[in-house]
Image (cartoon, coloured by chain):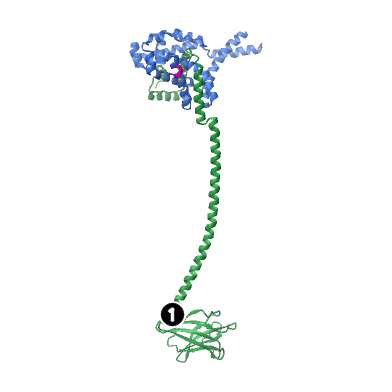
Chain colours: A blue, B green
Amino acid sequence: MVENIIFVYTIASDLLQEHTRNNRAAELLSARSEEAFSALYDSYSPALYGVIHRILRSEVLAEEALQDSFIKIWKNATSYDPSKGRPFTWMLQIARNTAIDYTRTARFQQNRKTDSIDSLVYDDESQSVNPEIQDSGLRNVIQKLDEKYRTLIELVYFKGYTQSDIEKELNIPLGTVKTRLRKAVLELRDLLRGESPGLLSVILLVIAMLIALIN
Amino acid sequence: MDIRQYIESGILEQYVLGQLDQNQQAEVERMAREHPEIRQELNSIEAALESYVQAYAKTPPAGVKANVMDEVRNDLSAGSGSGGGFLKYFLLAASFVILAGLLWYVYSQNRLVTEQNEELQIQLDTAEARLNQLTEDCEEINRRYTALTAPGTRSILMAGTDLSPDSRALVFYNAEHRNSYLSGVTLPAPPSGSQYQLWAIVDGQPVDMGVIPIEVDPTAFIDIPYVENAQAFAVTLERAGGSPTPTLDHMYVLGQI
């Protein structure tokens, strides 16, 4: 019984956290204080570093790009508009753009002359095996994503490919790129939904708490 | 536009993935503002991709944070940080003090200037009054000088009669310019209710030339009516305001031309 309550509670609190996390990130961004930014760094640097590292695949370059990204986040925090999107997405966009800018430098080009899509998509394990990933469940979900969708997201997200780049690279028409991108995200959402709790869980939590109270 | 169709088009995914140009981005943002379901869809897409990215999370080397926080601290102390805060407040306080001092200085200067101004105004008024007096005096002197130096002017001394041997007065008579003046009036003070009156004698007949002011100074130079063919002048004591005919036994001075 107690285990059930704990289980349901954990799921529901995740859901709640997801809501408050956004507000908290927005607050930390707008606070303009050392403490707030330090907290923001602690919360989001692993995710941003993960993205940057995945794009640049060099410790040295990724470190520099991460540093640049957080300095940009600090300097541009006042221009973040919560009505345009979630704070994490906004920060990710800065990190991605910074890293993609790095890929255009001579230093990156030297390292990556022989880079290919295959290596990008299929060297997942070798590149990302990382004892520090807390959420192995999330990784499993990503692995379940249809390979063609994963390729697409990876190209767009981690290589900064434009649609016409993809059209050339994968040899699929522009219209198809667009719809496939939507399907990719939809499938991702479906997979994640299976992982994360819905309204039912909240109802379950209330029931669980009631039971706990009665007991 | 059909919202469902708009969502299905995949443009929102492109937006979140940073695939749109500025105009298209602004369009999506506008649509999201107008339609909550689009905002909701964007949120879901963002959440999905955030989760995707979270799968690759990797703890960065510790040195990076130190560098970032150094930059943040620099930025804060250069701008509105705690270090700069003191300076900011100090400068703010200092500027208030300076401003207050400046205001006090301006106020006291203004008061001083106002006082000086009032004093100067008084001096100016005094000087102006004095100038007016001098101008009047000068005009008076000029009037007398012109009258006395005119070649046709004759001076007739009216000497005291037996009634008052010490009395006298002068008449200046100019037949060319047809004007005459009374001056140097030296007569006993008239008893109350009476007044001296001046007469001209024409062919043995007295002609009224008006009364002499009761309080008259010997230095006064009085305009008197011109009487043609006057042969003599006399002053008699009459009742206040004058008489139509002279009381001859009250004649004080008399002078022949």
Q: Is residue B201 above or below residue A94?
A: below
Image mark 1: chain:
B
| Residue lying furthest right | A215
The foreground one among B73 and A164 is: B73
- Is residue A4 found left or right of A85 in the rendered image? right
Which quadrant is the N terminus of chain B positioned in?
A: top left
Q: Position of residue A43 (x, y in %)?
A: 52, 18
Q: Main secondary structure of the magenta part?
A: helix
Which residue sits at x=44%, y=78%? B145
Quarter of the view holding residue A165:
top left
The foreground one among B64 and B208 is: B64
Amino acid type of the residue that numbered disc 1 sits on in the rendered structure: Ala
Residue that label 1 marks: B147
> Within 10 Å of the Cα at label 1, are there few (<14), some (14-19), or many (20+) other Cα atoms?
many
Quarter of the view holding residue B94:
top right
Looking at the image, can residue B76 be seen? yes
Q: Position of residue B151 (x, y in %)?
A: 40, 83
Q: Position of residue A129 (x, y in %)?
A: 47, 8
Which residue sits at x=40%, y=18%? A102
User: Magenta residues?
Assistant: A61-65
- Is residue B235 found left or right of B7 in the rendered image? right
Is residue B42 shown in magenta?
no
Q: Position of residue B111 (x, y in %)?
A: 55, 53
Which quadrant is the C terminus of chain B positioned in?
A: bottom left
The foreground one among B76 and A92 is: B76
